[in-house]
Image: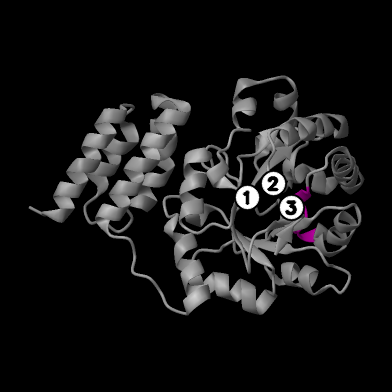
Amino acid sequence: MKIGNTDLGNFPLLLAPMEDITDPPFRLICRELGASAVVTEFIAADGLIRDVVKSIKKLEFSQQERPVGIQLFGSYPEAMVQAAKLAEEANPDFIDINFGCPVRKIVNKGGGAALLKDIPLLLDITRQVVRAVNLPVTVKTRLGWDDNSKNIVELAEQLQDLGIKALTIHGRTRAQLYSGKADWTLIGEVKKNPRMYIPIIGNGDITGIESAINACDRYGVDGIMIGRAAVGNPWLFRDIRHFLETGNTLPEPGLNDRINLCKRHLEESVKWKGEISAVLEIRRHYPHYFKGLPDFKPFRMRLMTTTSYTEVLDILDEIRKKYDHPD
C-alpha cells in the first residue's frame, strides 16, 4: 500500500493519533515494534498559525519515526491552508486532516467530527489543503455524525475526487463517541465500491490478532489503524505483524520486557518534554504495561500520584523485585 510515493508495505499497521499519547517517544517505540507508519498528535490549525509553543512542538519528529504524518484540525479553510503549509515545512511523509475527533472541546469549536454536519465546508477545506501543498494529503473521519447521517460511502468518493491519497475510517459515528462496538460494515462497503481506488484504512476496536485478521479478510481494507489498544501495549504491532507473516503467535512480553520498555518510554519522554509533563502523561500507559499483575493496586496508586521521575524509577525497580522474587 502506498500513500503518494511512500510505500507502507503489504497490509500496513498504522498508529492512530492520540492527544498526549502519540508523542515522539511513543511513536518511535511503536515503529520499532512493527508499526508501519505513525501520525502525530492532532495539531490545531489556529494554534500553529499563532505560533503557540505546544502546537509548534507537535511538529517535531525524528527520522527514525518515518513514515510519519502530521495531523491537523480546524474549521476555517484559510487557517487550514496556512497550517498545512507550515506542516509541510517540517517535511513529513504526508499531511492528515482530522474530520473524526468526537471530543466536545474540539467539536464545539467546529473542528474534528463537527465538519460531518457541514459536508460542503469539509469538502472545501480538503480541496484547498490538497491544492496548497505538494505532499500527499490523507483524511481520517467517521461513518457520519449520527445514525441518521451515515454518509461515508458517498463522502469517500467525494474526498477521493478532491485528490486525497488515502482515507482512514473509524467505524463509529460522532454520536457514539467511543461507546458500543465499531461497525465495520460501511467501511467494507467503501472498500468494495468499484469507484474507489485510493487505499482504505480501517480503524476501531482493533485489539489483537483476531480483529486485525477479520478486518483484512472480511472487510478487505488495505490496512488498519490502531489507537487505544496500543496504549501501554506497543507489542501489539509486533504480534499482529508476526502472525500475518508467519501464521504463528509470539509469547507475551515478560515482566522484565515491560519494565524495561516502560523505563525507556519514560526516560525518552523526560528528554523530550521535561520531567513533570512526562511523569503525568505516561500515567495513561501504566495500567496496560502492568496488566494482569496480581495485587498491583498499591504500586498503581503510587505510580499515579507521584510527580517525581526518580521515584517512578524506584517504584519500577520495586515492581521488578516484587514479582521476580515474590514474598
Labels 1 and 3: the sequence-earlier one? 1
Q: Is the residue under label 3 in contact with that under label 2 (CB below 8 Å)? A: no
Q: Which mark is residue 141?
A: 3
Image check: 33 left or right of 81? left
The residue carrying pointer 3 sits among few (fewer than 14), some (14 to 19) or many (20 or more) residues within 10 Å by Cα, namely many
What amino acid is at disc 2?
Answer: Asp
Task: Identify the mark nearer the N-term, 2 or 3.
Answer: 2
Query: Disc 3 residue type?
Result: Thr
Residue at image coords 81%, 48%: 116
Query: Residue 51 occupies which quadrant of the picture?
Result: top right
Q: Which quarter of the rendered picture does the N terminus lie within? A: bottom right
Indicate left or right for 312 with 87 as reference. Answer: left
Q: Toward which corner of the image does residue 78 lie, by quadrant?
A: top right
Image coordinates for residue 268, horizontal then vertical, percent: 41, 36
Q: Position of residue 265 (x, y in %)?
A: 39, 41
* Circles 1, 2 touching at the beta carbon (< 8 Å): yes
**Vertically, is 234 above or below 94?**
below
Q: Secondary structure at mark 1?
A: loop
Q: Marks 1 and 2, Cα distance to the nearest angstrom?
A: 6 Å
Residue under numbered circle 2: 93
Q: Is residue 280 visible?
A: no
Instruction: Name the side, left or right, on which 148 lies relative to 102.
Output: right
Query: Is residue 47 at all visible to an observer of this figure?
Result: yes
Disc 1: which residue = 67
Magenta region:
136-148
As for residue 225 lying within the magenta part, the answer is no
